[in-house]
Amino acid sequence: MFWKSGDDEVDDEFDIVIVAGGLGVERTVNDLPLTSYWRVDALAQPALARTSQRIIISGAGDGALIDILRATIRDFDHATFYEEVIQGLRDVQPSIDALEKKAWTKFLESYGRPGDKSDHVKKNEALESAEPVLTAGYKELAGTIRQCLEQDDRRPINPDFSICWLSPRCEYEVTAFPLNRLLSLQGHPGLVSQT
């Protein structure tokens, strides 16, 4: 697969390629079968043919972040996993809420600035203005969050996958669901992010 990352051109091989373009039936290329976010796939299943697979996930929204979780956490079940995590994060929830509010304030301040820029450009600039707030805040909270999550950690990290995550804008995109961002970025040893 070939892609551009900033000014760099990258050419690499992957066993699975995921383009998280949003909900619905996805466009296909080269006569590949139709796929949909809502259909069952083999991502969360262990590899059959060999011990590890390389996966590339492209996207910065909730679909991409959920796919990172599905590939990262063995036996991932969305509803039960989130319920367990929410209970584990109760002690740090006020700090997370304050951080998210601060980031949203920064996003809205930037987005609301008068000017002749398109909505698309304004949104991207606003996302980029909020990212440092989230990056610094979650870095500061990382130890506390990890400690909260490890208290009842019954879901082992899936060692079968190494993941290359291509995010077109920001790692910490404020418009994505906070829990998806938080959990995706908490550290799978095989997750390499390239924006």
Image: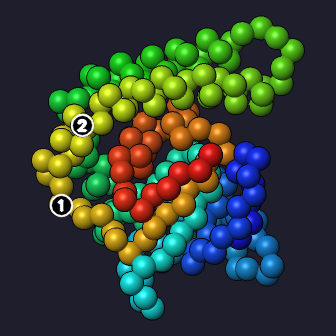
Q: As shown in the figure, which amino acid type bears the numbered disc 2?
A: Gly
Which quadrant of the view contains residue 14?
Answer: bottom right
Residue farthest to the right? 116
Q: Position of residue 31 (x, y in %)?
A: 79, 81
Taking depth in this image into account, of 92 and 137 the one nearest to the observer is 137
Mark 2 Cα-neighbour bin, 10 Å: few <14, some 14–19, many ≥20: few
According to the image, label 1 marks what residue? Answer: 154
Residue type marked 1: Arg
**Is label 1 in contact with label 2 (beta carbons under 8 Å)?**
no
The correct choice, above or below, for 92 with respect to 14 in the image is above
Element at label 1? loop
Left or right position of 98 against 23: left
Q: Earlier in the sequence, mark 1 or mark 2?
A: 2
Q: Residue at x 68, y 18 (%)?
A: 111
Above or below for 187 versus 39:
above
Q: Residue 86 location in percent, x, y? A: 26, 41
- Left or right, residue 78 beside residue 65: left
Residue 23 visible to the viewer: no
Task: Indicate left or right for 4 with 58 as reference.
Answer: right
Task: Point out the residue furthest to the front here.
Answer: 8
In which quadrant will I find the N terminus?
A: bottom right
Task: Report x, y in % for residue 131.
Answer: 54, 29
Per the image, the residue denoted by label 2 is 143
Q: Which mark is residue 162?
A: none
User: Residue at point 27% right, 56% down?
Assistant: 80
Instruction: In this rendered view, identify the residue nearer to me: 109 or 133.
Output: 133
Confirm whether residue 160 shows in the render.
Answer: yes
- SS at badge 2: helix
Q: CA distance from mark 1 to mark 2?
A: 19 Å
